[in-house]
Structure formats: structure tokens, C-alpha cells
């Protein structure tokens, strides 16, 4: 995704803008003050890992700190990896529950 970070020279707000290849001459406008004088910032980038990549990196025997267990996605991936290690196929229902846990949608069922 072609995301770029900018700083408004008028109000010094930093913001992100999507600039598609065919929009290379797009005028960038500050969302805060609507100024048109902006400078492009050097920003970090992210690397998308597939679920299989993440699963291969999980060591289910490694100790985890409390913050690891606060993220439902980690727990779901850990459970999936552990089932693979045990050679157990818990079926599609297991995968559905894990996916709901990873995306936070599992709470939707209990908030009713």
C-alpha cells in the first residue's frame, strides 16, 4: 500500500496519505488546517507476515510475559500452533473459534 507520511508546514501536524501510482501529482492537503504546504517525511515501513510465517516462528514452550496473553491474536495463533505440534486436527469449528478470537469478534457473541 503506497502510504506516505507528511508534515504540514503551517500547523506542524503529521499525517498519513495514500498516494496511488497514477496520482503522483496529487495535491496533498493537511487534514487539520487544510494547508497545502507540506513536506514528505521519511517513515518506517512494515512487513506483512503470513499466518504460516507467524506460526513457524512461535515457540509454544517459550515463557511469555503478561502482555503476550492480553492480545487475543497471540492466543489464537499459539493454540493453532500447539494443535499442529500435537498432530491433532480439531476440525473447522476449532479454526472458526480461533479466528474469532484472533480478530476480537469472539466478544460480539458475549456482549449480547
Image (cartoon, rainbow, N blue to C red):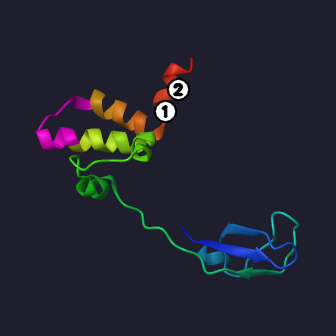
Q: Secondary structure at mark 2?
A: helix
Quick check: 55 above or below 89?
A: below
Q: Is residue 86 magenta?
A: yes
- Residue at the image position 86 percent from the left and 72 percent from the top: 11
Asked whether residue 27 is in view, the answer is no
**Residue plotted at (23% across, 56% down):** 56
Graded by Cα atoms within 10 Å as few (under 14), some (14 to 19) or many (20 or more), the crowding at tag 2 reads: few
| Residue at image coords 35%, 32% | 96
Looking at the rendering, the stretch of residues picked out in magenta corresponds to 82-92
The spot of residue 7 in percent (x, y) is 75, 76
In this figure, what is the number of numbered marks?
A: 2
Whole-angstrom CA distance, mark 1 to mark 2, is 5 Å
Q: Main secondary structure of the magenta part?
A: helix
Q: Are marks 1 and 2 in contact (CB under 8 Å)?
A: yes
- The residue where tag 1 is placed is 105
Residue 47, quarter of picture = bottom left
Report the residue marked by disc 2.
Answer: 108
Q: In terms of secondary structure, where does tag 1 sit?
A: loop
Is 5 covered by the magenta stretch?
A: no
Position of 94 with respect to 110 (left or right) is: left
Amino acid at each position: 500500500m503506497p502510504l506516505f507520511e507528511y508534515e504540514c508546514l503551517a500547523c506542524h501536524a503529521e499525517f498519513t496519505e495514500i498516494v496511488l501510482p497514477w496520482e503522483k501529482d496529487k495535491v496533498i492537503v493537511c487534514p487539520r488546517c487544510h494547508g497545502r504546504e507540506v513536506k514528505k517525511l521519511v517513515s518506517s515501513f512494515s512487513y506483512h507476515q503470513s499466518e504460516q510465517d507467524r506460526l513457524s516462528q512461535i515457540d509454544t514452550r517459550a515463557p511469555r510475559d503478561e502482555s503476550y496473553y492480553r492480545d487475543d491474536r497471540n492466543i489464537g495463533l499459539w493454540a493453532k500452533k500447539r494443535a499442529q505440534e500435537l498432530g491433532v486436527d480439531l476440525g473447522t469449528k476449532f479454526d472458526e473459534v480461533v479466528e474469532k478470537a484472533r480478530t476480537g469478534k469472539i466478544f460480539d457473541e458475549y456482549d449480547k
